Image: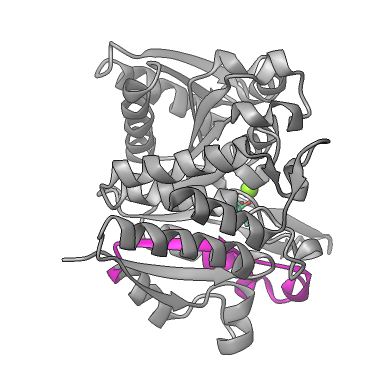
Amino acid sequence: MGKHILILEGDGIGPEIVREAVRVLDVVNRQFNLGITTEHGLMGGCSIDAHGVPLTDETLARARKADAILLGAVGGPKWDKLDRAIRPEKGLLKIRSQLGLYANLRPALLYPQLVEASSLKPEVVSGLDILIVRELAGGIYFGEPRGIRVLENGEREGYNTYKYSESEIIRIGRTAFEMARKRNGKVCSVDKANVLEATMLWREVMDELHKDYPDVELSHMYVDNAAMQLVRAPKQFDVLVTGNMFGDILSDAAAMLTGSIGMLPSASLDKDGRGMYEPCHGSAPDIAGQNIANPLATILSVSMMLRYSLNEPAVADAIEAAVGKVLDQGYRTADIYTEGKTKVSTSQMGDAVVAALN
Ligand code: IPM
Ligand code: MG
């Protein structure tokens, strides 16, 4: 039976970039006879506007039934002043935790054509291919207790809880080791084990788990050093595995190595490989509706979806080759534009990828 995809465009540039990604999905669906069906739903600010909450139970139920979810991005200034409990981001966090999407894969791959677009020197980034494996359903993002309370002296105090259980560390650790086996055989685990107990345990458990993967090389690095190494000598890394918050921060830094965060796809997988696919970037409200955003991160997220949840690696390869081809042809959205190239809009970039596939 054909696979079913739930599409959540979200807010800001979400609808524009998802539109191009869905065109690409439609083309490969026909070309390769995949029999994929799709439906659309609301999440984030658009859902708040329509239903008063960022993710309704009905949409969550549809997400549970889908074989995969394609997401644009959520959030924007329009909803920033709302009560904490119904902010757009809450919808995203809820779907991640409710669906058990604990393994967030964020590949930072530099297309050779974009070496000029990176803010780092070509020799530092050329050939870059690293994978950040970010724990996505635990850590300080979800730890209880949390909140903002009033102390006895009358001042307010904000507080969160950073915790990881052994089983949570083991399952994300396994993802990292298994990914490394298919790549260059190296895992660097990032923590703050010199200060935070939660990550002292993280380091211990990673070492214990390593015994199951003797063929993979394991190293450890403190997060502050990892941030520095990522911009100093990023090619030393193969797979980086880390907790939710550190992974959030390091993946944005890694994105810039590749020229633009507009190039970075991601996959968020559950224990069975079902997943949600979204660009690493946000909803970019400042450029929303202008048809200038880069749709390639979302198009590449479709490719990850075909690879990881729909078991269609050849189709994923075809999309990645098409992206390579449009970059060869010199097409660039504003975020990756360098002199001498052809500046294109969001929809023109979509056109070019579709043409490259045909
Ligand atoms: C990301 C985003 C989200 C996160 C926000 C929008 C909640 O920054 O996917 O990296 O922090 O996880
Ligand atoms: Mg982020």
Which residue is at a point 39% across and 52% down the rendered structure image?
101
Residue 103 in magenta stretch? no
Q: Residue furthest left?
A: 1
The residue range painted magenta reads 65-93
Residue 142 appears in the picture as rendered: no
Q: Does the magenta stretch include residue 92?
A: yes
Frontmost residue, 164 versus 237: 237
Whole-percent x, y for residue 239 in the image: 47, 24
Residue 127 in the image: state x and y as whole percent: 57, 19
Q: In this view, does 93 lie to the left or right of 154?
A: left
Viewer-nearest residue: 52 or 208: 52
Q: Residue 86, relative to residue 130: is it above or below?
A: below
Locate the N terminus by quadrant: bottom left
Is residue 207 placed above or below 12 in the rendered structure? above
Q: Is residue 64 visible?
A: yes
Residue at x-position 55% and y-position 62%: 20
> So how many labels did they put on this image?
0
* Residue at horizontal 56 percent and vertical 33 percent from the top: 108
Color encoding of the figure: one colour
Q: Residue at 25%, 60% (x, y): give it.
A: 33
> In which image quadrant can residue 66 be found?
bottom left
- Place of residue 51 in the rendered image (x, y in percent of width and height, measured from the top left): 55, 88
**Left or right side of 92 for 228:** right
> Which is nearer the eye, 4 or 45?
4
Asked if 59 appears above or below 301 in the picture, the reply is below
Q: Where is residue 82 in the image (x, y as percent from the top left)?
A: 72, 76
